[in-house]
Image: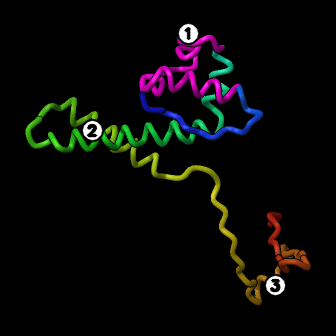
Amino acid sequence: MSKILDIQFKDNENDLKEMQEHFNTIGRRALFMSHYELADATDMTPIEWKKFITDIRVSTVLNEELDLIKKSKVALMLKDIETNKNTGQAQLLNTLLNQTKQSDIKEGPVFIYTQIPLNEQEQHAPNVRRLENAEDNTTTISNEW
């Protein structure tokens, strides 16, 4: 049997190592089980499983696995699209395609750093306060109009 997860946990993370072994023992169906179902299948609690699945290392690998599964299912459906005129399958294909697009989009804040010099009018406006910073020489415009 091949491993689903092969994460190198630290020596002091024996609980995570043990849970990874349980997860791998269950096999591929563990990818689709909730923390409650994993608890029912093992001697671990749902809370322990929840901590395990939400660990950033584990969740990253699980998300990669699920993305690969989705992409392979889409490829299989695309292969049969010429011969299969089933409306339900077309809707499922559309949903899977949208999900794979969304998984390619990175989430989280985006920071864009830029410097725009003030023009002559802005430099002398009453609502501008210059904050001189030795590191980056920034200027802010007050929201008080």
Residue 13 left/right relative to 3? right
- Splitting the image into 4 quarters, where does residue 56 fall? top right
Image: magenta residue range: 15-44
Q: Is residue 49 above or below residue 94?
A: above
Is 27 a magenta residue? yes
Q: Please give the residue where the numbered disc 2 appears in the rendered image.
A: 93
Q: Please give the residue where the numbered disc 3 appears in the rendered image.
A: 123
Q: Quadrant of the C terminus?
A: bottom right
User: Which three-letter amino acid code belongs to the residue tagged 1?
Assistant: Asp
Q: Is residue 56 above or below residue 143?
A: above
User: Which three-letter amino acid code belongs to the residue tagged 2?
Assistant: Leu
Where does residue 51 sit, x and y in percent of width and height? 67, 27
- Splitting the image into 4 quarters, where does residue 54 fall? top right
Residue located at (48% from left, 20% from top):
26
Residue located at (82% from left, 68% from top):
142
From the viewer's side, name the closer residue of 48 and 90: 48
The answer to whether the residue labelled 2 contacts the one labelled 3, judged by CB atoms less than 8 Å apart, is: no
Q: Is residue 25 above or below residue 113?
A: above
Query: Sequence order check: which comes first, mark 3 or mark 1?
Result: 1
Name the mark on residue 40. 1
Question: For the residues carrying marks 3 and 1, which lies nearer the camera in this image?
Answer: 1
Where does residue 115 sit, x and y in percent of width and height? 72, 79
Query: Sequence order check: which comes first, mark 2 or mark 3?
Result: 2
Is 80 a magenta residue? no
The answer to whether the residue labelled 1 contacts the one labelled 2, judged by CB atoms less than 8 Å apart, is: no
Q: Is residue 94 above or below residue 13?
A: below
